[in-house]
Amino acid sequence: MFDSHAFFKQRFSGHLKEMSRYLRYIFNEHIAFAMFFFVSATAYYYQQWMMDLPENFPTAWIIGITFGLLVSYSPVRTLLKEPDLVFLIAAENKMGRYFRDAIIYSFVTQLYIILLAAAAFGPLYFNSYPDRAGNAYLLTLLAVLIFKCGNLLANWWMLKIREPGTRQIDQAVRVLLNVAVFYFIMEGEMVWASATTVLFAIVFLYDLNVSRKQPGILWDLLVDKDQSRMQTFYRFANMFTDVPHLKNRVKGRHWIVALVSRVPFANRYTFDYLYRISFVRSGDYLGMYLRLIVIGGLFIYFIPNVWMKLLFALLFLYMSVFQMMTLYHHHRTVMWLDLYPVAAGVRRQSLLKLLFQLTCMQTIIFAVLFLMMQQWMGMLAVLIGGTVFNYLFIQGYARKKLMG
């Protein structure tokens, strides 16, 4: 007798074991240090900023949009794999408990983001609405959990619809209604909040009715969605360690390739060319690099203390080097590289050169940001300090790590 509940427990145990193996590498001492620095500095300046909060600050919009988006993004993790398309279809009528467990698992694992957002917005809420009782915020959080559960079920029902356009329209409508509900709750407009809640309930019941009319489960869609999320996690984990399950995606980006691929035609520049092309086209290296620049620039712009700005600039330079070092192992499964008539030291030096070029470009961008804020000492400090830090860290830690 097939027990889908026991099968989910077995699949969940294997999934948890695999995730924990990669999370050990992700949350290592480097990331732990960066996170501790981020949290400490952000908490300090958040507290300082709350003391001078403007009276017309759009608290309702910020909290309403954030909570609305958090409850709208409610994917269902089914933990299905490609072989299930063959072996589980015959047991579809016995998979009810399995999918019930998958929905519960998805709800529980997504709660931590809501709790973090609730803790972060708590001081802003009470500072913006000092006349409201604390129970009002707790009731808002209860509403967030209810809407989260509703959106999770609606997303599950819509996974029985083959047409992606129908699913996208339904998702867009629910996003707008979710944002509107929490905006009106923050504004204290309970009549409008009730009206938009009724509209959400109508969409919710419509999704239920549509799903019941579908002939069965779209196994290929469920597997594709779950595998896509796992590949996203693998691409992130690949920044910290080798991931054999990763399916590398190659993107064209021809105009960027044309800019970065101009190197002299000689043996010693072989890996200069390869690593530049890999950085632009493979995996998520370019995206990660740009995100670190943007996030670091935001910290530099909004933090008032110039020395803290400099520390954050150095921290993001450090993170960029640490993340981009995995380029060295990106082609580890390509045997043809071993046939190149190029010494291993040349290969290592090519990557170190690229790392220095990328971090120097990042340093210049941070310096321009200081220049736009007319902080001349900060500009000079980040230019000199960033360049020295890049050279010492790359030629010291990065070189030793690649040789190991």
Image: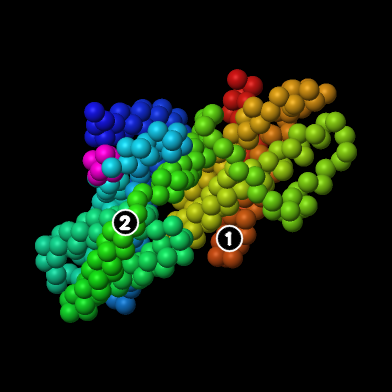
Residue 400 position (above or below residue 104):
above
Report the residue marked by disc 1: 369
Q: Main secondary structure of the magenta part?
A: helix
Vertical arrangement, residue 305 with respect to residue 396, above or below = below
Which residue is disc 2 drawn over?
Answer: 157
Q: Which residues are magenta?
A: 94-102
Q: Quadrant of the C terminus?
A: top right
Q: Position of residue 72 (x, y in %)?
A: 34, 60
Q: Residues within 10 Å of mark 2 (few under 14, many from 20)?
A: many
Seen at 61% across and 62% down, the residue is 371
Q: Residue furthest right?
A: 265
| 12 or 337, nearer to the observer | 12
Mark 2 vs mark 1, foreground winner is 2
Residue 376 visible in the snapshot: no
Residue 390 image point, x, y percent? 62, 39
* Numbered disc 2: secondary structure: helix
Q: Residue at x 46, y 60 (%)?
A: 164
Of callouts 2 and 1, the N-terminal one: 2
